[in-house]
Image: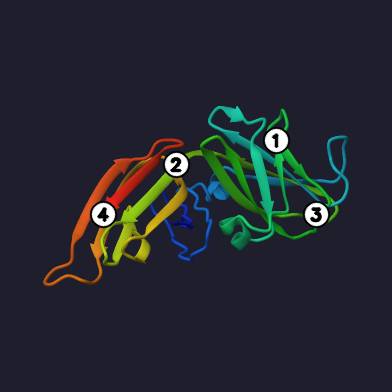
Amino acid sequence: MSHAILFPTCQKGLRQPTLKTMNRKITLAACVLATTALFSCSKTSSGGSDTPAGTALQITVSDAGGVLPGASVTLYPSQTSLQYQTNAIASLPTNSSGVATFSNLQPEQYYWLALDGCEAGTGTIIASSNVTTHASTGLLSTGTLVFTNTSSNPYEVKVNGVVAYPSLAGGVTETLVYQLAEAYSIEVIQISGYVLYPTDKTYTGTLGCGATLTTTFP
């Protein structure tokens, strides 16, 4: 079993898949990745008692209830590193004001993953040289989608109308983590091994925060 990546677009319910295979992968819920556009903002500051020296990032994490002290924020050097959760630069908890501060950085683009319980959010920003760049990110409720193909034949798997797996092999289980907690429609279409017509089934279910929604087919 592997954990697959399914990065979304900004449109709710529409996901843009990145289909690669590794031992552990991450996917973010629809519009969680888009919190950069929907919930995030940025500014820079060059001084003050709360401003770290050199090039730094301060990321404020919040959800519908306000700022989140104790949330985990992990900083990555690239989108690929974020997707696969590899080569993390640092991982810090937010302080009492919901802020995580990363110091001694290079003036370049960074990506982050923020987690608090079953809520997740991510974003990206360019750190300006020798100043502190401020960003904010909002978390959304997420869960896990699991797909198990009990057939010996490959199936195409669509999640809310978007292809997540062009060919999920028989006897294989795949997992998508950090998916938006919402209603899902899962369509599976047999690719080969049929006589006249392929098996084409649709399953529906609602994913709760921190829950797992498993689709076993055919």
The structure residue drawn at horizontal position 61% and vertical position 60%, both measured from the top left corner, is: 79
Do the numbered discs 1 and 4 sit on residues whose CB atoms are within 8 Å?
Answer: no
| Residue density around tag 3, few if under 14, some if 14–19, many if 20 or more, within 10 Å | some
Amino acid type at mark 4: Phe
Spatial CA span between label 1 and label 3: 18 Å
Do the numbered discs 4 and 2 sit on residues whose CB atoms are within 8 Å?
Answer: no
Amino acid type at mark 3: Leu
Between marks 1 and 4 in the image, the one whose residue lies nearer the viewer? 4
Give the residue number, with chain letter if any, for mark 1: 94
The structure residue drawn at horizontal position 59% and vertical position 40%, both measured from the top left corner, is: 115
The structure residue drawn at horizontal position 37% and vertical position 63%, both measured from the top left corner, is: 165
Do the numbered discs 2 and 3 sit on residues whose CB atoms are within 8 Å?
Answer: no
Between marks 2 and 3 in the image, the one whose residue lies nearer the viewer? 2
185 vs 139: above or below: below
| Residue density around tag 1, few if under 14, some if 14–19, many if 20 or more, within 10 Å | many
Give the residue number, with chain letter if any, for mark 4: 217
Which x, y percent locates residue 94? Answer: 70, 35
Do the numbered discs 1 and 2 sit on residues whose CB atoms are within 8 Å?
Answer: no
Which x, y percent locates residue 139? Answer: 55, 39
Which x, y percent locates residue 83? Answer: 56, 57
Quarter in which the C terminus is drawn: bottom left
Which x, y percent locates residue 121? Answer: 56, 44
Spatial CA span between label 1 and label 2: 22 Å
Give the residue number, with chain letter if any, for mark 2: 143
